[in-house]
Structure formats: structure tokens, C-alpha cells
Amino acid sequence: MREQDIRPADILATYLELSRQDAGKYFPDPAALPLGDCPGCGAAAPGAHHLYDKHGFRIVECDACGSIFVNPRPAAGQLETFYRDSESTEYWANVFFPTVAEARRTLIFAPRARGVLDLAAAAAGRTPRTVFDIGAGYGLFLEELSRLLPDAALRAIEPGRSLAARCREIGLETFEGYAEEAVGDDAWNGQADLVTSFEVIEHLPEPLPFVRTMRHLARPGGLVFLSGLCGDGFDIRLLGAQSNAVSPPHHLTFLSQKGVRALLARAGLDCVGFQTPGKLDVDIVRGALEAGRDVACDAATRHILLGDDDAARAALQARLAAECRSSHMWVLARRPAREDD
């Protein structure tokens, strides 16, 4: 898989430019936004050092856990307005994702469904029978999971009206609203064998309440799975401000592995597994080098990235994944069977 397969260059460029314009429109003075603690380990500000600026936002790294995050950063209420009204959000929902939906189904969602199911079954000792997906979007993950678990209760949590309607159209029981609201419904609270969330955590300035919500939706002893962008990742670290993944105010938080483990503990979850099965780091950095960007890359790695040896690049990507140094992370956690709330 190459980045072009799931993020075609032309529509990606349009989306990134709209994001840049929206950053200035909705947050004209990022320095006036509130300071926050580390979203991973909770280390109090200013326990982080400045890395670089992007779209006017200050990007820092936590001195305690190595997580990368925007600080100062927008509050949750400000982000609700941004996601409701911004052009970049509308473009993503109505142009970008529909254009690549079927390619992503084949390349991402089908293998994701199998991979998550295998992880959950191994951790629980049995196949999950009730699965909640938070931010279900077009319902592609649950749709693919239904092919593997035709008798399971697969349920979507989706705040977007049109997306929630789409989930219902394909036969998914759907809670139209935010996960925090679903916790207040006895039909959802504490009912899932497995709660999933894909590529949400990097959008959150304060992920702790969200992860606690995932815990509440899981039954005691149930599993929580999340994926997202990892601050230890090869392309994020190497490209820095030039990384397309670092795109505030859309992406605000890039947790390190240490930060993830600290966050789970703060949320009352036991970490079952952490991995970075990413496939695009090498392709992304290679593309940046071919585009003439100034990338601080050692000579040996540059030779692998720009040379003609596809096998060497595949080996490098495999090594990054094995060493948990890819920018795409998978995290599996368990709600304790007995706990003090």
C-alpha cells in the first residue's frame, strides 16, 4: 500500500490548504488559547519543550513521557464549532472520504476488522459478541466486521446526522450523538464486549475524558481498542513541521507509547497490548525527499529511501513496525472486572 492509494495527492493538497485557511479563520491568535497539561501522562504545564510551530500553533514535547502535542490549544467547545462549520471538515466528509471510501474498505477496513477481531479474541479467550464503534462514520469497519461476525450485535455511535443515517441504512443499531451521551443510556452503558475508536484520539486536546467514556461503555472485564497517530512515529519525528499528519487544529495530540500507557492507567484501564502496524512511514518520507523537502535524514536511511531497492524499503518499514516506531498505533486495553469508580 502507498499513501497515494488512500490519500490521492490532489485531494490531499486541497484538504491541507483548506485546513491551513481554517486554522487562521477559527483560531486567529493561537497564543491566546488556554495552556493544558500533557494529554498523555498529565504532567503539568510547562513541563514540555518547544519543537516547532505549525499553522500558528506551538508544538511541544512532554519532558516526562515524550508525547507531542499542541499547547496552547483549543478548548472542546471551540472545536465543536470548528468541526461543525469549517470548510476543511465539510470537504473531508463530502469529497475526500467518499472519493477513497472503497479503496479504504479494501486496503484498510477489511484487514482492520480481521486484525482487531483476532486481537480481541486472543485477549478475551473468546469472540466478542457485542461491539460498539465510536465515531463510526460511514460504518465501514462494522460492515466489514459483520462479514466475520454475522450473529454479533454491532452498534454504531455517531454524532453526525447524515453519517448516523447511513449507519442505519446498512442495518446498524445506531446511537446518534456523542459517546459521552451514550454513557447516560442504560442500553449502552457498560454493555460492550469490545469498544473501538479509530483515528479519533489525535483530534482531542484532552483525551482522558474520552478514554474514560470508552471504559464506561465496556462491560466489566470488556476490551477497549483505539488506533491513532503515534508521537514516536518515524515520519512524524523525521518530518516535524513538514509532516502532513501534524495539522492543527485537526490533529492536536500525538501520544508516545509511554504517554499511551500513562493515559490508560489514568483512565482506569489495564494495557493489554501496544503495537504500531503502520505501512506508510517509509513511503511518506520518501515522497517528502522526492519533493525536495529539507529532511534531516542520515545518509544510510536516505540511500534506502531514494534507492531502487524496494525490498530494502519494505524491510525498513517492517523494522519500524516491529520496534513500535511507526506513526500508526493500535492499542488494546481492558476494563478491570472489579473496580472502584
Image (tube, rainbow, N blue to C red):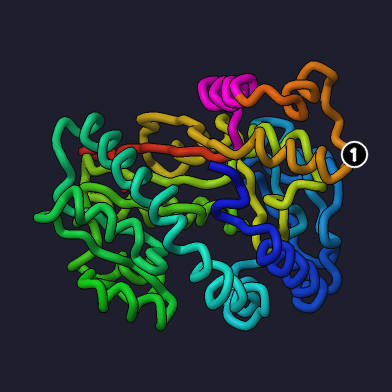
Which residues are the magenta region? 311-327
- State left or right for residue 51 relative to residue 268: right
Q: Single out the residue that lies furthest toward the front.
A: 308
Q: Is residue 77 visible?
A: no
Residue plotted at (39% across, 52% down): 106
Q: Name the spot of residue 293 as percent of width and height, x first.
A: 87, 43
Q: Position of residue 172 (x, y in %)?
A: 23, 69
The local secondary structure at tag 1 comes to loop
Judging depth in this view, the residue of 335 and 245 nearest the camera is: 245
Q: Position of residue 154 (x, y in %)?
A: 21, 60
Give the residue number, with chain letter if any, for mark 1: 294
- The crowding category of the residue bearing disc 1, from other C-alpha atoms within 10 Å (few below 14, some 14 to 19, many at least 20), is few
The residue drawn where x is 21% and y is 38% is 337
Q: Quadrant of residue 257?
A: top right
Residue 232 visible in the current orientation: yes
137 magenta-colored: no
Q: Give 341 or 232, whichever is nearer the viewer.
A: 232
Q: Name the magenta segment's main secondary structure.
A: helix
- Kindly identify the residue that appears in the image at 64 percent across and 50 percent down: 253
